[in-house]
Image: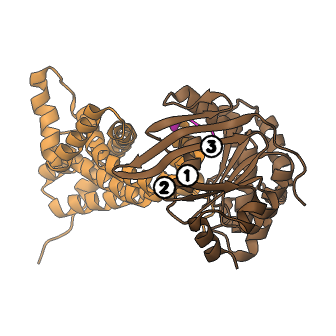
Amino acid sequence: MRAPEPASAEPIIVMEHVEKWYGTFKALYDINLAVLKGERIVLCGPSGSGKSTLIRCINHLETYEKGEIRVDGVLLGNRTVAIDAVRREVGMVFQQFNLFPHMTILQNCTLAPMRSLGLKKAAAEDRARRLLDRVKVLEQAEKYPAQLSGGQQQRVAIARALCMQPKVMLFDEPTSALDPEMVKEVLDTMIGLAEDGMTMICVTHEMGFARQVADRVIFMAGGAIVEEAPPQEFFTAPSHERTKKFLGEILP
Amino acid sequence: MDYKLDFSPVIAGMPSLLLGCLGTLTLAICGMALGMLIGVGGVFLRDSSFKPFRWLVIGFVEIIRNTPFLVQIFFIYFALPFAGIRLNPTPTAIVALGVNGGAYAIEIIRGGINSIARGQTEAGLALGLHKAEVFRFIILKPALRAIFPSLTSQFILLTLSTSIASAISAYELTSVSQRIESESFRSFEVYFTDTFFYLIISWMIMRLFALISARLLSYPVK
């Protein structure tokens, strides 16, 4: 069931020598990463290894002190215009869903397309309903987030991000806050997205997902990229001690 | 105890007492509106990246919260004319109430905003919304909902503080009561009625806030 579409040779995200400090604590060490269009990347590693920090730099939810990040050719500096342009192209799904509690599911999905893409209400609602249908929560469209299960909320969060028609999707531990029985429905949604050719970077501990859809698995520790390899190689023949130790701890 | 109750001066003065109630309500509602404006604006300045604005707001809040309201009214009414700012009693009272209520509202509203999880802001920013849009569409309503009980009690307090405006003879319930009392010497009857009217006014304001909360700020929560 591996996705057939090959990744194109054109990088859509380029990170060069990115470094980040929190005060005196160095959170990212010389990150170099090129993500190709259509590529599916799984980022894993022990907690505190900088995985979330790395992907949060891509849409500038975190600042960084050194290096360059380009998204679809746009250099992400500190200019508001560039940051806005990048954020419109990059969707993000959070561990805690972060749906807006005072809006219906439909309103959650139409707010940003109407405000930042200038879509008319009818067009935004059409798009939202189509995508809610795709993640199989269309019948909940008029409800409020608190009335949905965790799995449903996370699927709405995915649909909400897709409503911006992003070129890249970032997933920050999307299943970590879910009850076990709801993990599969969210992973299935993500697998469907991968099969449709979406460029994805997923921070996750779901190694089954990594095996199934990732083109590349990246292992981070202590704020640095330690090892990257296609899943087959990553799981069967990891080259670094830290990777072996990590895999030994999380694989059954 | 052979004091005989005599409400006739109160009854005779009822039209002016009711007008006084109206004056009190006007002061309270205008004061709240101004207080809300100062509160929201103050929060923006307080958390802006331009440091002098922050210091200005912090200084303002500290001064207002650590001085008596009566002195603040006197300052505006008696001292500001020397700086060329001369206001009539009613506008003076409204400004004083608004400034005083606003200083407290700044702290209450900030608390509400800080109580909204950081993830909400991040989700909005990640969707390409600007900071101001995030505040207006994502933060404001849940924050107002969170602070509504404390905002209600602060504004009830503001409503009751309107009585202090009688010190500069603003037209409101207590100054009317004082006049009737000084003409009739029926202190018990006059202030009994005065108290009763304040209870009703407070209750009305409370109902108004409950209505606003139910109509505008309710949504299902876990």
Query: Dot 2: what SS?
Result: loop
* A10, A186: nearer the viewer: A10
Q: Amino acid at mark 2?
A: Ile
Determine the residue positioned at 51% across, 37% down: B131
Q: Which residue is mark 1?
A: B120
> Residue B67's spot in the image, x, y percent?
14, 48
Q: From which residue to which does the magenta span run?
A: B127-131
Residues at marks 1 and 3, CA–CA distance in whole angstroms: 28 Å
The colour one sees for chain A in the rendered image is brown
Q: Residue at x 21, y 43 (%)?
A: B165
Mark 1 touching mark 3, by CB under 8 A? no
The answer as to whether the residues below labels 1 and 3 share one chain is no
Q: Which residue is mark 3?
A: A33
Q: Is residue B129 magenta?
A: yes
- Indicate left or right for B2 with B190 as reference: left
Q: Furthest-top residue in view? A: B84
Q: Nearer the viewer, residue A42 or B213?
A: A42
Q: Which residue is mark 2?
A: B116
Q: Is residue A6 left or right of residue B128?
A: right
Q: Tell me, yes or no, if residue A114 can be seen here.
A: yes
Quick check: marks 1 and 2 in contact, CB under 8 Å? yes
Q: Is residue A69 above or below residue A2?
A: above
Q: Which chain is orange?
A: B
Chain hosting mark 3? A
Q: Residue at x 22, y 29 (%)?
A: B88
Q: Determine the CA span between mark 3 and mark 2.
A: 34 Å
